[in-house]
Amino acid sequence: MIILASSSPRRQELLRNAGISFVVQPADVPELPRKGELPRAYAERLAREKAQAILRQRPGDVVLGADTVVIVDEHILEKPLDSADAARMLRLLSGRKHEVITGVCLAGAGLEDVRSESTLVTMNSLSEDDIRSYVATGEPMDKAGAYAIQGIASRWISRIEGDYCNVVGLPVSLVWRMLQEHGARPET
């Protein structure tokens, strides 16, 4: 049994679309970077902590933990705190290239495999009206970097270099390879 240590509807949809069966049991771990922690290390650490938190409750299962961060100018952009924070993030991303990193951890009895995927995303320039109207939709509020590439914000994404699913929230190809390498049978 694969346990997804996340309540993210986007991760669930990606796994379902790929034919990977799972059960949801969200992990509740603090999402705060440590002083001097690099973005990739941070995303991987959180993925590991989420997977391990659920594995302690379900030691007979295989747990998938994941965490996605957006990086611009060496700053980690996670989910916005409020509308003003979402607008701030969108201004930072406007007209620029940024990196999206998702840390992934597969954990089980005698198993802990932590990896990450990185994708470069180019966002067109946004006007203040674009930002204001987009934030008003509510879509940015539970998304790393305050945007959903699969939603309204898709109109402003002019280029991606790497795994699209990674930007949505889970690098499905990487997860599939990890499951196969460890002999998991996750197909529905």
Image (tube, rainbow, N blue to C red):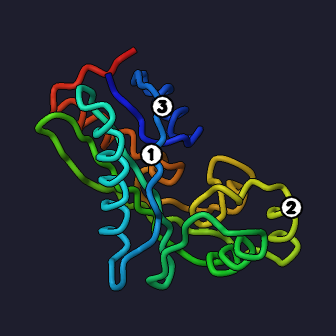
Of the two numbered discs 2 and 1 on the same chain, state the one appearing first in sequence: 1
Residue assigned mark 2:
136
Please name the residue shown 45% across and 71% down the image.
32
Q: Are marks 3 and 1 in contact (CB under 8 Å)?
A: no
Q: Secondary structure at mark 3?
A: strand
The amino acid type of the residue labelled 2 equals: Ala
118 w.r.t. 2: above or below: below
92 w.r.t. 104: above or below: below
Please name the residue shown 54% across and 49% down the image.
168
Q: Residues within 10 Å of mark 1 (few under 14, many from 20)?
A: some
Q: Are marks 3 and 2 in contact (CB under 8 Å)?
A: no
Residue assigned mark 1:
27
Q: Between residue 30 and residue 130, name the one nearer to us.
A: 30
The label on residue 24 is 3
Viewer-nearest of discs 3 and 2: 3
Viewer-nearest of discs 3 and 1: 1
The amino acid type of the residue labelled 3 equals: Val
Q: Secondary structure at mark 2?
A: helix
Please name the residue shown 69% across and 73% down the image.
90
Of the two numbered discs 3 and 2 on the same chain, state the one appearing first in sequence: 3
What's the distance in space between the residues labelled 3 and 2, CA to CA?
Answer: 29 Å
95 w.r.t. 27: above or below: below
